[in-house]
Amino acid sequence: MKQTRAFKAPLAAAVSATLMATLLPLSPATAATEVTARTEVAAGTEVNAQAVTVDSAVQIATKKIQRDPSKTDVFVNKSYPLSPKKYAPKTVAVKGTNVRLQPSAASAYSKMVKAAAKDGVKIRAVSGYRSYARQAELYNYYSRIYGQSYASRISAVPGTSEHQTGLAIDVGNNNSQCGLQACFANTPVGKWVAKNGHKYGFILRYPKGQESVTGYSYEPWHFRYLGTTLAKSYKNSGAKTLEAYYGVAKSKSNNNSDKKSKGTAKTTANLNMRTGAGTNNRIVLTIPRGKSVQLTGSKKSGWYEVRYSSKTGWVSGTYLSNISMPSTPKKKESSKDSKSKSTNSKTATTTANLNMRTGAGTGNRIILTIPQGKKVSITGAKKSGWYPVKYSGKSGWASAKYLR
C-alpha cells in the first residue's frame, strides 16, 4: 500500500467518481538457549574466539533480505527501492477483474477468495499491479493536492512501491463499505483477511500504530503476498512489520525522549537479539558479551526489548545484568478525557483521514475528506456518535470515533 496506494486511505472520498475510476489500476538458529552455542564452552576456552561479532551478525541478517524483484519474497520500502526502479513483472488478470498480479499471487488470491466465500465473506479486488509510470502519476497527483510530506505517507515514490512488484493487493467489500478507509478493518472482509490471509501467503503490510516504522499511514486494506511459508513464519514471529521481522525497523522515539527515559543493561554472554520474545523468533544479530544495550521499557515473559547497533529486538533477561529500566513516561490522558477537552474547547483533531458528510451517518453523502491530524471546529452537540463540524469553509458531520 505504501505503494502509492492506488488510492490511499479515504482519499478516495475526496475525489470525484470519475477521478476515482482514473486512479484505480489500469488493466493492462536453532540454539536452545538465548546464548550463542559457543558461550556454553568452558570459560577460558573458545568463548571469545567463536563469538559472533556484531558486524558479521548484521551481515547475516542482511543476507536474508531478498532484493531480487522477480522473487516472491522481495523486500521493498522507502529505504529498499526496487532495482531496477522501473522493474515490470509478468502479471495476469485476477479472475473476474481487471486487477493484475504476478501469477503466483493471483492464484493464491483466488484460493483465498474461495475460502472466504465459504465463510460467507465476499472479497473484492480493488487494486493490484501498478507500473512505474502509473505510480509516478499517482504520487505527483497527491503531492499537488496535499503537499509532498503528506503525500509520502499515503503514496509511494515511484520505484519504492510494493504495487509495482505485482505482489501487493488492496481489497474491499462488495458493497464498498469503508473502502480505503481505516474503518475497513472492522468490516467483514477486513476482519477475515487480517485473520486468515497468512494461510494463503498474504500479510497486512501497513498495520496500525506502525507509521514511524513503515513510513506509511495505517492501511487495513493493503496486503502483501509473500508465499505461505514466509507469511506463516512472519505471523508466528510476532513481528508487527516486515521491517521488524528483518531487523531493519527504525527507532520510534526521538532523541529527546530517549535521553529523558533511557534505560540500560549489560550482556553477560554473547546474546541473541530476536524479532520477538521467545527462542522461536528469528535472530536479528548477536550482541557480544559485556556490551551495554538500551532498554525501551517493554518486558514480556522474562524478555526485554532492547536497542543495540541501530537495531531493535528482544533478548532474554537471564543474560542481562545491571538492569536499569527507563523512567515511566507520564500517563496519557484517556481518550474520553481528551475528547471531552477537545469538544469543550469547540475544536478537535482528526485521528484518520475522515469523511465529512451531509448528515450524521455513513448513509449520507460525502462532502470532502479531512486529512489525518487536522483541526476541525465542532459547531454543535453530538448526535448518534457524530459531531457537526466545520473545516476548510465547509460544514457537515464527522464520526466522533475519529476525533480527539
Image (cartoon, grey):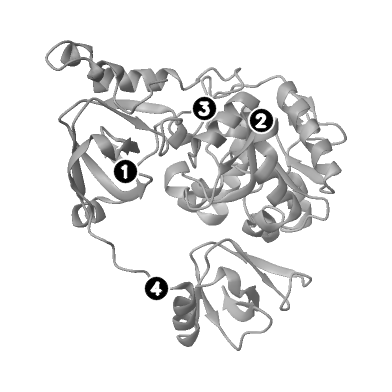
Query: Could you tell whether 81 is left or right of 113 in the image?
Result: left
Instruction: Name the image quarter holding the N terminus.
Output: top right
Q: Nearer the viewer, mark 1 or mark 4?
A: 1
SS at circle 3: loop
Marks 4/3: CA–CA distance: 38 Å
How far from the left and from the top, in percent, is residue 326? 23, 54
Residue 312 seen from this side? no
Whole-number angstrom distance, CA of label 3 to CA of label 1:
27 Å
Q: Earlier in the sequence, mark 1 or mark 4?
A: 1
Do the numbered discs 3 and 1 sit on residues whose CB atoms are within 8 Å? no
Q: Earlier in the sequence, mark 4 or mark 3?
A: 3
Which residue lies under the disc numbered 2? 201
Q: Measure how far apart labels 2 and 4 are at the Cα level.
A: 39 Å
Q: Residue at x 53, y 62 (%)?
A: 372
Q: Which residue is mark 3?
A: 75
Q: CA distance from mark 1 to mark 4?
A: 26 Å
**Mark 4 belongs to which amino acid?**
Glu
Residue found 21% across the figure and 25% down from its top: 288
Label disc, if present, on residue 304 of the rendered structure: 1
10 Å crowding of disc 1: few (<14), some (14-19), many (20+)? many
Disc 2 crowd rating (10 Å Cα; few below 14, some 14-19, many 20+) is many
Residue 119 in the figure: left or right of residue 248? right
- Residue under pointer 4: 333
Instruction: Tell me which amino acid carries mark 2.
Output: Gly
Residue drawn at x 44%, y 76% is: 338
